[in-house]
Amino acid sequence: MDARSNGYLPLEDYAAVGEGRSVALSGKDGSIDWWCAPNMDSPPLFDRLLDAKDGGYFLIEPDEPYTVTRAYRTHSNVLETTFRTSSGVAVLTESMNSGTAGRLPWAELARRVEGRSGSVQFKVEMKLGRRGNTANPYHSTIGKHVVFHVETVLGLLLHSDGVECQWEDEGVSGRFAVSTGERKTFAIVAGRDEPLVVPKIEDVDHRIDISDDEWRTWAKSIDYDGPDRTSFVRSALALKLLLYSPSGAIAAAATTSLPERIGGEKNYDYRYAWIRDAGYTIKAFLAAGAEAEAKAAFSWLLSQLKRHGPKVCYTLEGDLVDDVKEIEAPGYRQSSPVAVGNLATSQHQHGIYGDIFETASRFVGSGNILDASSAELLAHLADECADRWRMRDAGIWELEEDQHYTMSKVSCWQALARAVELADQGQLPTTCRERWERERNRIKDWIGTNCWSEEKQAFVMYPGSQKLDASMALAVRFGFDGFERLKATIDAIDRELGKGQFHYRYSGAETEEGCFLACSFWMIEAHAILGNRQEALQRFDALSDALNSGVGIFSEMIDPNTGSFLGNLPQGLTHLAHLMTLSVLHKEYAPDLENRPQKDHQGEKND
């Protein structure tokens, strides 16, 4: 099999493994092309994803022609890849290991190869990345171990007996064979500025199955008993990979600089925690019954609001995000620049108010209680929203031009509507409750007067514009007033921004990027809530079929003409939109879903 083009795999050919601290992307040819260790936002050890020629990777691949099938183990983030050659069949099982007591205090990437029939020869290659020519890896001998160094990261490549590996300046190469019933296990153990544990390879191998059991145990707790449970749990598992357990932050995605259009310049670093994404993911965890994850993420979010005020995004440790820095690398399929940092940190988006209050409302709606300190913080944020809603902002899409974006005003309406409801429930102080209510009503009137276009028969992107914004589909979820106008807006978005099963974010985006997958799920959800029951179900099935080319890991965008994934992945916003859409469809239209033919999910292995 040779699925690479100029050294690059299609993004849909990657699967993700992780343990709550880091995420590795494994290609269908047995090559791990992206892994930041020990943390999700650390510089990468393996970065061939962004530099096919000189980037680092860890390859375990048959040394003869083969075909491949792959799937996650059922309700698990442990991955299995089956290689078939003319001489035999072997399975590669991959896991970012944890233990019975939770996440290990070191990074442990485990890869097991088992012979199923005949005999299969494999080659092994490990090349450490240079981090855009900012580091030169080297190895040394300490005791009986060969240790690799990348700046302050210290690591080991461990393997079973009977595998011959040779260290060179660039890394490691070797070969081995497995026959029926045989297995060979490999592991990379790494840490940064800390003593390095050297586990037995037998213990590493055992922890693959321990990790699988832990994932399955967690998945059993997912509170969803509707049809398509397999795909629902798969998205919940993907979101769980993005929950950074040392702090409780939720990363928007596990990668940086994957392009929104091949050759384009929209190549951003998503290894940060956005208020928007964190808020939506908390709601998704609540919908899935994952109370512990929702509580951890909500507590982290409130803590950063108290510490820094309402910013667009924070680092996974809760600091402010650095300015953008470009790294010397060609980028995925020559799409540069490759960057770390994010410009959004210096922007203001009114959407953060709606996101925070909707999250608090969902948290309370699940039977939870706000503490006095958090209630006081939220009350101050409601006052701030009431003061600032008339200002221009960068909008949900973080655009360079500040405008009176309609969706931003809807978010302010949403924030104050939820603040009033929380005050009425005794969760917030009522001192300014009447003011919040009056400003909420003023925002509604302002939107109705300034943002509706008779010509378009839709709410436009901002007053005076004839552009449309697909994020207005969220106004339906938020309960914004005006059923008929919202329905007309959804129809206009379908007409002008729709492309097959997909949707562009806003008018003109088709020249800049692919279709935004979350928008298509939001549109299905909106159709369902607005009463278009059969259409919503048909759209969901068609969109699911269009995305069923990989193992259930979704990117940010897609090329509607080719079906190729675009943008960073796993993309939390896409997975939570998928999960929330299923939740709404099941809740609102359970009889229709129960009568619908069920499909196998390509990304899940049946035990």
Image (cartoon, helix red, strand yellow):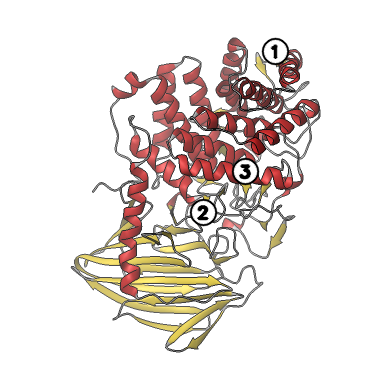
In the displayed structure, does residue 479 sit left or right of residue 313? left
Q: Nearer the viewer, residue 233 or 30?
A: 233
Q: Position of residue 189 (x, y in %)?
A: 45, 71
Q: Indicate the quadrant containing the N terminus: top left, top right, bottom left or bottom right.
A: bottom left
In the displayed structure, does residue 266 sit left or right of residue 449? left
CA distance separating discs 1 and 2:
50 Å
Quarter where residue 288 is shown: top left
CA distance separating discs 3 and 2:
13 Å
Residue 338, visible in the rendered structure = no
Tell me if label 1 and label 2 are in contact, CB under 8 Å: no
Q: Which residue is mark 3?
A: 301
Amino acid type for the residue under numbered disc 1: Glu
Tell me if label 1 and label 3 are in contact, CB under 8 Å: no
Q: Position of residue 512 (x, y in %)?
A: 65, 41
Amino acid type for the residue under numbered disc 2: Ser
Q: Which residue is mark 1?
A: 455
Of discs 1 and 3, which sits in the foreground? 3
Q: Which residue is mark 2?
A: 245
Q: Position of residue 44 (x, y in %)?
A: 57, 65
In the displayed structure, does residue 527 sit left or right of residue 72? right
CA distance separating discs 1 and 3:
41 Å
Q: Dot 1, crowdedness within 10 Å: few (<14), some or many (≥20)?
A: few
Q: Dot 2, crowdedness within 10 Å: few (<14), some or many (≥20)?
A: some
* Residue lying at 40% horizontally and 18% vertically, measured from the top left: 534
Which circle's residue, 1 or 2, is located before the other in the chain? 2
Quarter where residue 489 is shown: top right
Q: Position of residue 220 (x, y in %)?
A: 33, 42
* Residue lying at 30% horizontally and 34% vertically, measured from the top left: 599
Amino acid type for the residue under numbered disc 3: Leu
